[in-house]
Every structure is written in C-alpha cells, then in structure tokens.
Image (cartoon, coloured by chain):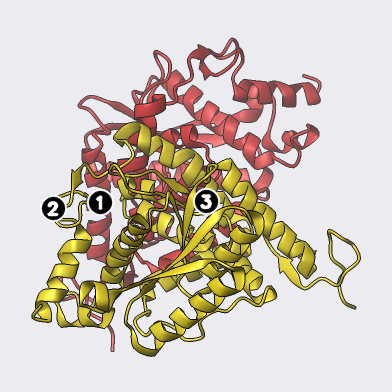
Chain colours: A red, B yellow
Amino acid sequence: MPRICRRCKVEKAEIYLSYSREYLCLDCFNRFFEKRVADTIERYKMFRAGDYIGVGVSGGKDSAALLYVLKKLYPNKEFVAIHLNHGIGEYSRDSLDRARELAESVGVDIHVFDYVSRLGISIPDVELTKYRNKVCSVCGYIRRWALWKAASELGVDILATGHNLDDTVEVMLNQFITGNFEELTRLRPVLPPEVPGQVWKVKPLIRSPERDNFYYAMFNDLPVKRIDCPYYVDARSTRRKRLLDMWERESPNIKFQLYSVFTKKLIPLIEARYGAGVATNRCRVCGGPSYGDVCGACRRIELVREAKGL
Amino acid sequence: MPRICRRCKVEKAEIYLSYSREYLCLDCFNRFFEKRVADTIERYKMFRAGDYIGVGVSGGKDSAALLYVLKKLYPNKEFVAIHLNHGIGEYSRDSLDRARELAESVGVDIHVFDYVSRLGISIPDVELTKYRNKVCSVCGYIRRWALWKAASELGVDILATGHNLDDTVEVMLNQFITGNFEELTRLRPVLPPEVPGQVWKVKPLIRSPERDNFYYAMFNDLPVKRIDCPYYVDARSTRRKRLLDMWERESPNIKFQLYSVFTKKLIPLIEARYGAGVATNRCRVCGGPSYGDVCGACRRIELVREAKGL
C-alpha cells in the first residue's frame, strides 16, 4: 500500500525524511526544502537589498540545487553563475556542459574561470609537483582562491556556495577531533571579507542534507554531471562520512544536532577567545588575505607553473 | 604460531592493544598499564606528600584495578577503600563481598557507607517515587553525594575513583552534542573542592580504556563482582558506547584523541569563558555544594524517605 504524504495528506509519498520522520510527496518536499533554504538565508541575513550575487556552480547536485532554489526564491535578485574549469579532461568537459545547461535553464549568466587559459595550469599538472599525492588538497586551495578571484572580477557583493550539511558536519567533526579550533570558525554559514574589497561568502544549503540536495536536483530535473572526478578517492573523509551515516542511523537528527552545537555554542566560544581567525596580511601576488607574505593558493599555483617550466 | 611480545621480545603475547598496535605479554602489559596510571597521576599532580587517600571501590573491575595499582605504585601512601552499599539485594551483597576481599588482599582498610542504616533507604526504594523510571540517574546523584560524605567523615584529603577512558569520553561526547558545555568541566581528571573542607576528586584511570582495566583485573586475579546491577539497562548510553566502539574500529586511537581534545582544548576554553562551573551555595541539609537551597542529592534522598513514610 503506497504511503500518503504526511503534509498534504493527498498525494502519494515519494521520499522519507528520517530526521523528521516524515513521508512526503514531491510538491511538499520541494516546498519543505525551499522553505528551509529561505529560513537559512533569513536567519543569517545572507542577502541584502540590491546585492549582486555570485553562485558557485560546479556541475554537481549541490550547486545545481543551490542556483535553482535561489532563482526560484528570489526571482528579482541579480545572480551570476561562476564555474571553474579545472582542466580535468572528460570530467571537466561534462561538468562545464551541465553548469552551462543549468544556468541557461534558469536564465542566469554564467562566467567560466578557466585554469588553463588564466593560470597556464590544470589540476592534473599538480601531479608534476611534490604534492602529487595531495591533488585534492591543492585543488581545494586553488578552488577557493579562483572562486574569490572570479567573484572579485565580476564585482559581485556576495558569493554563495553549495556546501551541504553532511560535508560541513564532517569537516567540523574532523577539525574538532584534530584540535584545529581556529579553523572551525571558517565553517560558519556566513564569512565576512577578510581584506577590504573581498566578497562576503554565504552557504544557503548549510542546513540541507546531501541526500535532500540530491532528491531536489532529481525531482526538478536539474542537469547534473555524470562523471566522477578521477582524483576523488579521499578514503579518510569517505570513512568519516560513513561513520556519521552510522551515527545517523542511531540518532536520525545527529547531523543537525552537531551543526547546531558547533555553530551556536563552540564557534562563538572560539571566536570570543581567539577572534574570528582572520588572516591579517595581504598576499604580495594576488592581494588576497594571507597568513604569510604569499598566500597558500599563490604558492601552490607558482609551484605547479614552475614544474611546467612556466 | 604464537606471537611474541613486542616489548620484551621473549614472552608469548597475550593481549593486543589496537590503539598502539602492540601485542604484549602479561608482564609487559602490567608494566605498561601501571606506567600509564603513574604518568596520569604525575601529569595532573593528583597526589601530594602526606595525603590520606580515599579510593572508591564498587566491587567492579575498574575500581578493583584502581585500588590494586595505587597500592602497588605507592606502597607507602595511606589509602582507605570506600564502598557504598546500595541495598540492591544479591547484587549489593556480591559487590560488598568482592570489595572486602580486594581491600583485604591489598592490605587496605575498607569503610562501608550503608544506605539503609545511614539514610533509611535503599536504591530499590527509588521505585516508590516519581523517579521510578530514572533509578540510574537518582542512584548517580546519591552515589556522588555518599562518596563525598564518607570521604569527609573519614577525613581523607583526596578521593580517587575508577572512571575509565570509555565512560569519560562517552559522557563528554554526549554533553558536547547536547550542548551542556558547563557540565563538561566536571569531567576533568582533577576536581578541586567546591566548598571549603570538601575533598579533591581525582581519576587516575581516566586514560585507561575499559578493556585494559578488565584485563588488568583479570591478569592480577582481582576479586570482581559476578552479578550485574538489575537496574542497569541504560539503552542510550549503551548505544552511544557501541557507536564509539565502531568509531574506534575505523580510528583505533579515537578515544584518546577525543579525551585529549576535550581536556586540552575544549574544557580550558569553557573555563576561560564561564569559569569552572562551581556551585556557589551550600546545601541547607548536608552543607555540601549546591546550586540551590538544597542540593540535588538531598532533595532526592528526602523524596525517597517521604515515599517510605520516614
């Protein structure tokens, strides 16, 4: 016997939310999902009137859900999609195609920051350096930097990214366990500029479980990349995520609970003690925030360029 | 082929320590266990010269390991074993017998605080009150109070208890998740007196995993109770412990790592912000520390006495 939607009590239920113990139909799930995003944006005052908003769009489900829901919730705001082309062969071509398709379907311009034409390097070139076993880590440094760079060039006020609840909680827990308390402050839903002229960073999906983003993208037929990144074999983070999933089976609400403790209790405590973990220098190369003379991204980009003889 | 002990490289290994990936023989395990306890006592300066030390002895493996190892490490210090008789039928009789046997075998006097003769109540009497579904919680309140009371009467300077690593980390994690940050400070290895004249509380086994205490008690033929408490069916804490055990299979060191983050990073941060969570009042009934007019233990004892018509 098919279950009936707990909310409308009319339609057939299509999805079960274990954390709220609800069976929902497609329409009610969409409304529920969108309301949570709207609540998150309101709660943390992510957008202000007249903001020009950049949305990081990778080609994946999270950022697809993000751009789609933002345009639906705020049809009159000005958005621009930002895509980074990492130059990882077929994977990057598929990602770019899906990102373009998505932007077009929601009627938002897309700006592509192409690593090869802009920096002279691609992510596979990292294998030429001493970081050959840390491609994902270097990619993370360059990705944050390139998103910031593209956002600055476009003159956007806000940069929205698709960080989901699961990833956020996994990283929070890991930083906590390893005692990197100051790094924890970077996991807040809203990050103000670290140096003058930098954009605000916001994470409207920070309270959306990965699985919900997947279903939202699927139910709304959003174009999503079909190829996995060939470098993504981060066994440790996968193991930690599996652990959180086991934990969730015991306590269906645990990810929300951890998110809440981290953002409402621990991070404010850390900030009260150490400040907001803001880098005080400006990078000599790019002018962005840096702990030293040259920022971590510029150092890595330079290293890869050198390895290529550039 | 039997494995050889990693340390002495002579004897047959009898135990595997997953967190340090070592196979050890009985003698080397004993030495390793004792050194860790000695290091913990030194590190936190738990004992001072001339201290008269009360040791809580329940009849279980943790406190048996504690009294035995303390007497072995500090043969010239003055110890007294303190046992609480909860009046839980056969279980309590078995516990008392084992505690007496242990104290006698190590040559330490034992002081028994008997609930029925001292308070007029037993733990089963809690079932007569509105707390009938929270017997374990009430027992915890009364146990902490009675240990303190007995220790004060004996005039000891320090009260040592057998809290192990697993229990400590389980409670820490739970207090963390539920956001009870101020309660976390009570989980430190050393608790100073909250009101003048109270004893110091120390936990020399706080870095000893439960399993190691079990093996230490077994290898040294310590008398340990054979009957489980009939009230112990705390499903939630058992579930949480199982989760930590699963986590440990992925990261063999996780309990030590969590312990270290909590005690070295989080608790100092909380204390810097809120103070050490010390109760400022004195209980009108017992004179012990209290948040209100009458402390939580005295209120519960009185409730049970009333239910018995006392």
Point out the residue furthest to the top here.
A284
Which residue is depicted at the point 50% across and 77% down?
B100
Please name the amino acid that badge 3 sits on: Leu
Q: Position of residue B103 (x, y in %)?
A: 54, 71
Instruction: Tell which of A158 and B118 is nearer to you.
Output: B118
Q: Label 3 belongs to which residue? A: B258
In three-dimensional space, the C-alpha distance between marks 3 and 2, rounded to whole angstroms, equals: 38 Å
Q: Is residue A260 visible?
A: no
- Kindly identify the residue that appears in the image at 72 percent across and 64 percent down: B30
Q: Which element type, helix, strand or loop, lies under badge 2?
A: loop
Residue B7 percent location from the top left of the image: 84, 58
In the image, residue A169 sits, relative to residue A23, either above or below, namely: above
**Label 2, on which residue?**
B284
Q: Name the residue type under label 1.
A: Arg
Give the position of the N terminus of chain B as an image quadrant: bottom right
In the rendered image, residues at marks 3 and 2 fall on the same chain? yes
Question: What separation in Å lies between label 3 and label 1 (alpha carbons)?
Answer: 32 Å
Q: CA distance from mark 2 to mark 1?
A: 49 Å
Q: Are marks 2 and 1 in contact (CB under 8 Å)?
A: no
What is the secondary structure assignment of the residue under circle 3? helix
- Nearest the viewer among A219 and B204 is B204
> In screen coordinates, is B242 left or right of B194?
right
Residue A36's mark?
Answer: 1
